Image: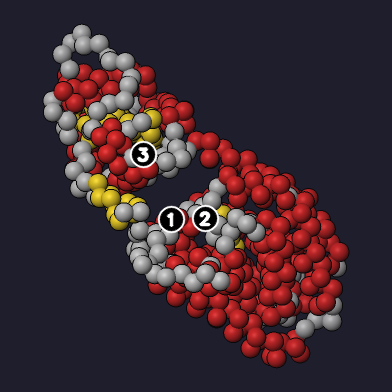
Amino acid sequence: MGDIAGDDGRVKGFRGMRVPRRGVTRWAVWTLPLPVLAVILAVELLAAGTFATSIPHEIGLLPDNWPLVTGVLIAAGILSTEASLGVERMRHRSDETPHIDLSSVWTFAAAALLPGAVAGLVVIGIYGHLYMRVWRGGIPPHRTIFSTATVVLAVQAASAVTGLVERGSLFQSLPGLAAVLLALLAYAAVNMVLVVAVIVLSGPNRDLATFLHVLTRGDEAVLEFATLSMGALAAGAMGALGPAYAVLVLPPLIVLHRTVLVRQLEEAASVDGKTGLLNAAAWHVRAARALRRVERTGGRAGLLVLDLDHFKLVNDQYGHLVGDHVLAAIAAAVRDEVRDDDLVGRFGGEEFVVLLPSIDAPSTDSEDGRIAAVAVAERIRSRVAEIRVEVPDAGGTVVVDNLTVSIGGSSFPADGADLGQLLEVADTAMYAAKRAGRNTVRMGLHAVPSGVVRPAPHNHT
């Protein structure tokens, strides 16, 4: 995984902790929570210790051409970074969350071709260049050191596995292939587990479920294994044909850099920056597609429109920064109360929308779809009422609670034949919930008297 780029402001430090003002002691690492700091320091000390102690034992295992292989791998890593410099910088500007930096192509190749200590030198060379050319000024030094340490440990684990087979036959036999696959798994496990552990410890949810969710999130894990596989192929070509064949890996790697950037920019364009939910445009596209699938299969779907009650008072009393924290908390609560395949979006302001594309209905009664949607809406309403948002500011901590939400809903096909009709019905039902005293749920056409005209959109209170 390599890079743990992110926003330091998301990591809460110790209140009142005094941060020294000079040199290394000014690094933000010293303000991290104690569990995070302990893991980071332990990983870095372990990497340094294993690197230093392995050198004497591996001197006799060095292949004759190890200086050439080491130099070629470092040079290839530097060339691939320089060739994709603009892409890498844009990736870091457009997405501060952890992501794959693709350098594992060369670091895994080093683990397959060289003993662990020398492979560690390749890591240090490549990551030192990455810091100077891409990360410097945007990523704190302690993150670079930690990322480097995790990869050093990963290449040592992978090198130990490949060392179980004669390196000369590593790419020429079935036992060699098995060793390469096991080494790939060892590399990914060590690197990803250490990085994800720190990410989870730095966040609000420090449980096993959160750890597994971050560890196995689809695209990043797939990209990591694809990159490692390219590293195995690069090592095979270099081992069988000569180190110069590393140049053949550069063109596809550069193309992969650009492909990953396009995907990253597409994701950024579809996400609301304040809540992390789908924005209105992206939600419309995906919801329409999901509703067509439901229609083809003869299924049912539900749609909920949620509006936070009296949100203008929060902004007026505490300011928009606190209001943004409240919106993020509401978004997280809604996301937690629905299934993974349900579509949650922010429509703007304090309004959210949820499509439930596969409502369980035990019979053909159209009311079953409404009942299932109401059950989800009631869970969300109850969850929002329990939210307590604490936001630190210059004067202490601002606490916002007693939040409520009005929810309107509709069901497919009972309340509408397309997404537009469902939105009309759910939005009108939401206004009925407002008129009923707020903090309530209203569902379907029956929630409002016939002939009521849908109000024009505005900031709801």
Give yes or no for contact between labels 3 and 2 (Cβ–Cβ under 8 Å): no
Residue 310 horizontal/vertical position (percent):
23, 32
Out of 13 and 193, give the one closest to the viewer. Answer: 13
Give yes or no for contact between labels 1 and 2 (Cβ–Cβ under 8 Å): yes
| Earlier residue among tags 3 and 2 | 2
Residue 212 horizontal/vertical position (percent):
41, 60
Out of 339 and 316, give the one closest to the viewer. Answer: 316
- Tag 1 secondary structure: helix
Instruction: Note whether 321 is above or below 163 in the view shown.
Output: above
* Residue type at tag 1: Arg
Q: In which image quadrant can residue 45 be found?
A: bottom right
Q: Where's the C terminus, which quadrant?
A: top left
- Location of mark 3 (residue): 320
Cα–Cα gap, marks 3 and 2: 23 Å
Q: In which image quadrant can residue 410 be found?
A: top left
Cα–Cα gap, marks 1 and 3: 18 Å
Question: On residue 10, which mark appears?
Answer: 1
In this rendering, would 343 be left or right of 7?
Answer: left
Question: On residue 232, which mark appears?
Answer: none
Question: On residue 6, which mark appears?
Answer: 2
Q: Residues within 10 Å of mark 3 (few under 14, many from 20)?
A: few
Residue depicted at x 52% and y 55%: 6
Residue depicted at x 56% and y 68%: 142
Q: Where's the N terminus, which quadrant?
A: bottom right
Residue depicted at x 44% and y 33%: 279
Cα–Cα gap, marks 1 and 2: 8 Å
* Residue type at tag 2: Gly
- Tag 2 secondary structure: loop
Instruction: Note whether 19 is above or below 48 in the view shown.
Output: above
Residue 115 horizontal/vertical position (percent):
71, 80
Residue 321 visible in image: yes
* Residue type at tag 3: His
